[in-house]
Amino acid sequence: MQLPTIRTAFSRICSNSTRDQCLSFNVFCVLQDIVDSLEASWNSQLVIFNSHGGNDFLKPFIREMSGRTKVFICVIDWWRVGKDVYSDIFEKQDDHAGELETSVMLALRPTW
């Protein structure tokens, strides 16, 4: 079963899209509820596609959940995919709003 994508932002400043949900509650609790629901419906895997480097709570979340659920949980950080060829593609290693993020956004939304 594939769950729908839940686009979120943790600050009203960051949420400049009407499609984003600004979360003012504890995301940790929301993810726990999702995992509990998956386990109750016999689903055994949850993939969290993380697109923000500041989401430091995800590792502790997985660590805590691994002791209380049979659901396999993994996190994919999009900027880490292809890290081994990063220097072959980009001139310098950068961070927020650098060459990597700009290239990804131009590929996804060339008219922006």
Image: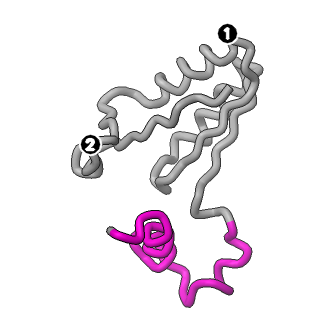
Name the spot of residue 77 as percent of width and height, x first.
Answer: 60, 54
Up-down relation of residue 44 to residue 5 (above or below)? above
Q: Is residue 5 left or right of residue 109?
A: right
Residue 109 magenta-highlighted: yes
Mark 2 or 1 closer to N-term?
2
Q: Position of residue 100 (x, y in %)?
A: 51, 74
Q: Secondary structure at mark 1?
A: helix
Give the amino acid at mark 2.
Thr
Q: Quadrant of residue 89?
A: bottom right
Q: Is residue 34 left or right of residue 44?
A: left
Residue at image coords 58%, 63%: 79
* Quadrant placement of the N terminus: top right
Secondary element at tag 2:
loop
Q: Nearer the viewer, residue 29 or 63?
A: 29
Which amino acid type is marked by label 1? Ala
Q: Residue furthest left?
A: 13
Q: How many marks?
A: 2
Colour scheme in the image?
one colour
Q: Residue furthest bottom?
A: 91
Q: Which residue is mark 1?
A: 40
User: What range of the chain is rendered magenta?
Assistant: 82-111
Q: Residues within 10 Å of mark 2 (few under 14, many from 20)?
A: few
- Position in image of residue 29 (x %, y %): 47, 23
Please give the residue where the numbered disc 2 appears in the rendered image.
Answer: 18
